[in-house]
Amino acid sequence: MHFLKKYQKIVKFTCLATFSLGAGWLYYQVKTTKKILSNALDTSILSIVEPTAIEKAKDDDFFVIDITGDPNRQETSYLQKWNALKFSFAKRLLVLASSDNRFLRKRAVRQLARIKKLETWQYSQLADMIDARTAVGLARTPGVEPRLFNNPPLRFLGHTHDMIVDVMKNLLVNLHATSQHPCMGYFISKAFVDLHEVEKFGGDDITPYELKNFIQTSEELLPTCLESLLHHASLGKYAKDIAELNGLPLLMEIHNRFKDNITVTATICRIISYLSMHKDLLDEMYKSGWVGLLAQWVKHDDVRISIPASKALANLDSDEDPVYLQRLYPLHPSTRIVQTPGVDVVFVHGLLGGVFFTWRQRKRNQDPLGFLGKKGVPESLTQKNSTCINKQCTEKKKKIETSDPVMREFMEEFETHAASGCLCNDYDFVWEDIPVNTNETALGPYCCSGYKYVCMENNEDDCYTNCWPRDWLAQDCDRLRIIGVNYETNLSLWTPICPVEKVKTLEERSDELIEQLERVEVGRRPIVWVTHSMGGLMVKCLLNKASESSDKKIRDLYTNTRGLVFYSTPHFGSSVASFSQASALVIWPSIEVQELQKNSPLLIQIHQKFLKLTENHPMKIVTFVETKPTVVSAMKFKFFVVEPDSGNPGYGEYYEIPLDHLGICKPASRHSFLYQKVLHMITSILDNNGPV
C-alpha cells in the first residue's frame, strides 16, 4: 500500500513536470516565432540603407563589380542589384499578405507599403500579383506607392457621349424594374423624353409642358442621372443592384470623362461609399479599378470626396469588422488603426446641416443663411482653396491692428520676444470667441500661457479646413475615433427629398441612429457627443431610449457616455419654427420644423427624461449658445434661431458666445474658445477614462 502511494506521487510529479516543460517549450516557440516574423517583416533597414545603398554596396559581396571599370555602369549595376533585393522581398511580403493569420497579413501589408523606389515594371508586376484584400489594406496605409494599383480598365472607351447616355438610361430602367421604387420611375419619365417610356413610368397625367420643363441638355443629363443614382443607392437595400447590373464600369467611365468636375466626382464617390456597405462586392470593385482610385481620393482636398472615400475603404477592409452604414462617416482615423482608440467622439449636425459643411472653420466674414435649400454650400469644399494662408499671409495675419498705444507697445514687445525665441511664461493669451456670459459652473479655461500659444502658432497648419474635427481634433488629441453623422432634412413638405419616402420623426431618426452606431461598436468605450442645433435633440432622445433598452450593447450607448457638447440646441424649441395658421398653410412646414416649435410638449418631455438620466449617470455637459441674430440673405432680415432661455439645458457648463446660429459650431481657428473648450473636455475624459 505504501509502495502504491509512493508510485502515485512519482507519476503525479512526472506528469506535472512534463506539462510544465511542454508549456514552457510552447511559450518559447510562440515567442520566438513571433520575433522571427517581426524581424523578417521589418523593412526599416531598407529605408535606412536606401540613401547610401550605392556607396555601401561597393563593399558588399552581394554585388558583382563590373570589370569594364566604367563607374557609371558599375553604379547602375549596384542600383539594379539593390532594387532586385527589394523586389524579391516585396514578393515575399505579398505571399505573407495572403496568409490566414490576420496579424501576419496586416503586418506584411504595412511593411510592403514602406518599400520605395522600385522600377516601374517591378511595380507593375507587383500590382498584378496583389489580391483585392491586400489592395484595400495598402490603400488604407499612409504613404503607399500609387503604382501598386493597376490603372482602371475603361470598357466604354470607344463610346460616344450619346452612347454613354443610352447605357446610363438602360441601367436606370433595369434598376427600376428590379426595385419598382417610384422615385426612379418618376425620374426616368422626366429625364428621358420618350412617349413610350413616359406611359410606362409616369402614366397619362404627365403633361407635355411638364416634360418640356424637365428636358436636359446632353451635357447636363449624366450629372442629373448620377444624382438619381445616388438617391437610389442611399436607400441601402437597392445599392447592391447597381453593381449587379454592371454599373461599376459605367461609373468609372463617367468619372474618366468628368475628371475636372468636382461635383460629379463627389457624387460618384458617395455612390461608391454606399456600395461599400456590401463587403461581398470587394472583388468586383477591385477589378473595376475602384480601390486604387479610392486610395487617391482619400488624399483629395475636397472633403466631399476624401471623407466618403475613407468610409468606402474602411467598409471594404475585411480585416476590420465594423461597417459604416448610410448615416455614418468615419472622420478619423482614415487609415488602419494601429493604436486602439480610447474615446469615440460622435458629431451630429442640425437642421439643413451636413457632415461635409457643418463643421467648417468659420470665415472672418461668415456668409448669411440661404433660405429653403443649401445655397450657402460652396461649389468646392477644398482644404487648399482661396482661403489657404501661406507664410506671407501668416505674416499679414500677425499685423497689429489696434488704436490703443499701450496695447500696441505690449504687442510689439511680445512679438520681439517671440521672434528671438525668448518668450516669458508671464504672458497669457486669451482665446478667440470668448463668452460674454456664463453660469456659476463654467470652468473655462479662457486663456493659455504665451509659451503654449507660440508653440501652437509654430505648429499650426495655416490652411482653411472644412472639417475641423478631422483636421484639428485628430492631431491635438491622440487615441480618438471620430465619427460624423449625416442625415437629410427639409424645411417644407413642398420640397421633399423623396416624395414617396416616409418622413422620419425625431424619435424615428434616433432609432435609426442607434442601430447604425451599434453596428460600428460605439458604446464599447467612453463616448463624447458633439452636437449642433437639432442634433442635440436627437442625441438626448437617443440616450433616453438607450437607457431603457434591454440590449446591453444599446444600453452601453448611455452608460458609456462621458461628455456632451451642445452648440445652440433648442431644448425647448425655437420661435422661428412657430408659424401662424395662415403661414403654415403657405409654407407647409416639414415634420422636423413642426417638432421644433416653441415649448413643444415633445421636446419638454425629452428634456425632462434626459435630466433624470444625468442624476443617475453624471456626465460632462458643455453648452454654447448664440447671442447674435442670424441673417437670412434671401429675405433680408435677422432673427434668433435659438434664444438663451431655450438653449440653456439647466445642467453643466453654460457659455453665451457672440456669434450667430451658423457660426457657433465653426471655430475661427485652433485658438478659438469654441474649439479649445471641447478639446480640453475630451482630453480630460481620455486621461481619466471617466467623467470629469
Image (cartoon, rainbow, N blue to C red):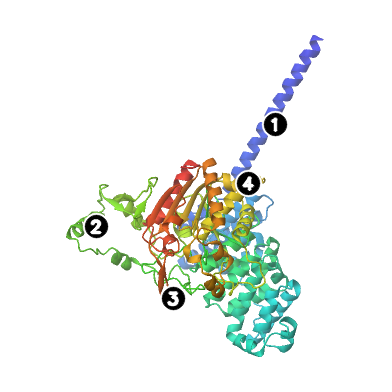
Q: Position of residue 419 (x, y in %)?
A: 25, 57
Question: Foreground mark, 1 or 2?
Answer: 2
- Please, what is the three-letter code of the amino acid marked with disc 4? Glu
* Residue at the image point whose x is 63% and y is 75% from the top: 228
SS at mark 3 in the image? loop
> Circle 3: is it few (<14), some (14-19), or many (20+) Cα within 10 Å?
few
Q: Position of residue 615 (x, y in %)?
A: 52, 42
Residue 566's tag is none
SS at mark 2 in the image? helix
Label 2 to label 3, Cα distance in Å?
Answer: 45 Å
Label 3 to label 4, Cα distance in Å?
Answer: 44 Å
Residue that sits furthest to the right in the current view: 1
Image quadrant holding the N terminus, namely top right
Residue at mark 3: 635
Residue at mark 1: 22
Circles 3 and 4 in contact, beta carbons < 8 Å? no
Vertical arrangement, residue 383 with respect to residue 190, above or below: above
Residue 548's tag is 4
Label 1 to label 3, Cα distance in Å?
Answer: 82 Å
Q: Is residue 62 visible?
A: no
The answer to which of 160 and 206 lies nearer the viewer is 206
Whichever of callouts 1 and 2 sits on the residue coming sooner in the sequence is 1
Whichever of callouts 1 and 4 sits on the residue coming sooner in the sequence is 1
* Residue at the image point whose x is 42% and y is 61% from the top: 664
- Please, what is the three-letter code of the amino acid marked with disc 1? Gly
Label 1 to label 4, Cα distance in Å?
Answer: 50 Å
Residue that sits furthest to the top in the current view: 2
> Circle 1: is it few (<14), some (14-19), or many (20+) Cα within 10 Å?
few
Q: Is residue 30 visible?
A: yes
Image quarter of residue 503: bottom right
* Residue at the image point whose x is 25% and y is 48% from the top: 424
Q: Position of residue 37 (x, y in %)?
A: 61, 47
